[in-house]
Image (spheres, rainbow, N blue to C red):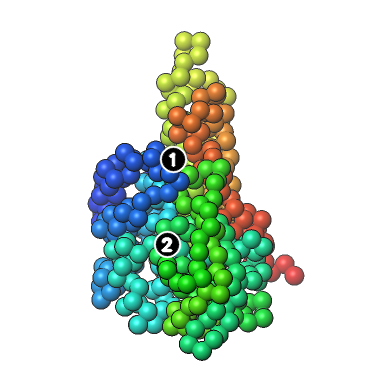
Amino acid sequence: MDRTLYEAEHEDYRRSVKAFIEREVVPHYADWESAGIVPKSLFAGLGELGVFAAVPEEYGGVGIDDFRYNAIISEEAAAYGVGPALLGPTLQADICMPYLLDLTTEEQKARWLPKVATGESVVAIAMTEPGAGSDLSGIRTKAVRDGDDFIVNGAKTFITNGINADIVITVVRTGEHPHKGLSLLVIEDGTPGFTRGRNLEKVGMHAQDTAELIFENCRVPAANLIGNEGEGFFGLTNNLPQERLSIAVASIAGAQQALEDTMQYVRDRKAFNSPIGSLQTIRHRLAELVTEVEITQTYVDRCVEALLEGKLTVADAAKAKLWTTELQGRVVDACVQLHGGYGYMLEYPIARAYVDNRIQRIYGGTSEIMKEIIGRSLNLG
């Protein structure tokens, strides 16, 4: 079924994204996987491409706030099998930038956004802690007011862009209330008391840096508080639907690419002098998966439209995240099986997808948390 989400200008942009990935990402991807990090120059190149174009013109951007352009980056990253390399930049565009665009003062915008627009500044958001994940009320990193500064003590973990980041939007506790005691504080590279731990070794997603961040008597200007003190939780919850939709877009694109790779494989692979795709059991399994993916794509596209209309609800975003990530897991697992022994060899894209995409059901809120969000929306008592 033809998709109706994109218009001509989006497809023009898609061609530019394809050319960029072929030229600037694919030739270097293996080296970045070995290094466990992409160069910061990648962010600058993507800035020129317009990935951070939502920044208003007066701050060096273009002022185009259309999530469909963001979605194209995720779709093409999946198509070329380089999603881990572009996860950091998409996190900056999809998840971090709304905080800097919506919650900052004019002075803060003028200070931070010009370099964000060009990709010169890399942005991370630090929520997760060693003892607090999906439950934001468990955050213990403290920020205590001291004159014109906050003194921050605590640690964060599993932070995407953590090594490369110049700007870290940090969730801190400024009060005792589980939710109203949270605030958002930008901690910049070079701030005394701010150090980075190791670049964490992961099962997959090797080209994307994931770090531990440590704050020891870290003195941060109160001028770096974004939004009002004590309103951090509400800023976070307002932005979570777009974050979860971003993951859903990447997940359904990844599932689609896994199917395309597998359908080509079963056409080429011979058994008993015929393509294995001619076997009914394989043909029927792929028929089931293709149907699930195409139907799911329709729902995700509708969620993108709802986001553009300002109508995407927390529950609908959770449904998209839950279903697409679980579906991707089923699809990739089935596709590995259909590849046979070759599906376990890292030279094949399906094997890399198997290790890279498992995290989708965890970050951005686990599947279990998504079910709880959806369940609460049903008003069952």
Q: Quadrant of the N terminus?
A: top left
The answer to whether any part of residue 162 appears in the image is yes
Disc on res. 165:
2
Circle 1 residue: 34
> Which residue is found at the position 62% from the left and 55% from the top?
366
Q: What residue type is labelled 2?
A: Ala
Query: Image quadrant of residue 33?
Result: top left
Q: Distance between the residues labelled 2 and 1?
A: 20 Å
The residue tagged with tag 2: helix, strand or loop? loop
Query: Image quadrant of residue 331?
Result: top right
Residue density around tag 1, few if under 14, some if 14–19, many if 20 or more, within 10 Å? few
Q: Which amino acid does label 1 sit on?
A: Ser
Q: Where is residue 161 in the image (x, y as percent from the top left)?
A: 45, 57
Report the front residue among 133 and 370. Answer: 133
> Which residue is found at the position 35% from the left and 82% from the top?
107
Query: Image quadrant of residue 66?
Result: bottom left
Location of residue 168 with respect to 352 vertically, above or below: below
The residue tagged with tag 1: helix, strand or loop? helix
Q: Position of residue 327 (x, y in %)?
A: 56, 45
Residue density around tag 2, few if under 14, some if 14–19, many if 20 or more, within 10 Å? many
Report the front residue among 85 and 34. Answer: 34
> Which residue is found at the position 38% from the left and 62% from the top?
122
Q: Where is residue 352 in the image (x, y as percent from the top left)?
A: 49, 37
The answer to whether any part of residue 291 appears in the image is no
Q: In which quarter of the image is the C terminus?
A: bottom right
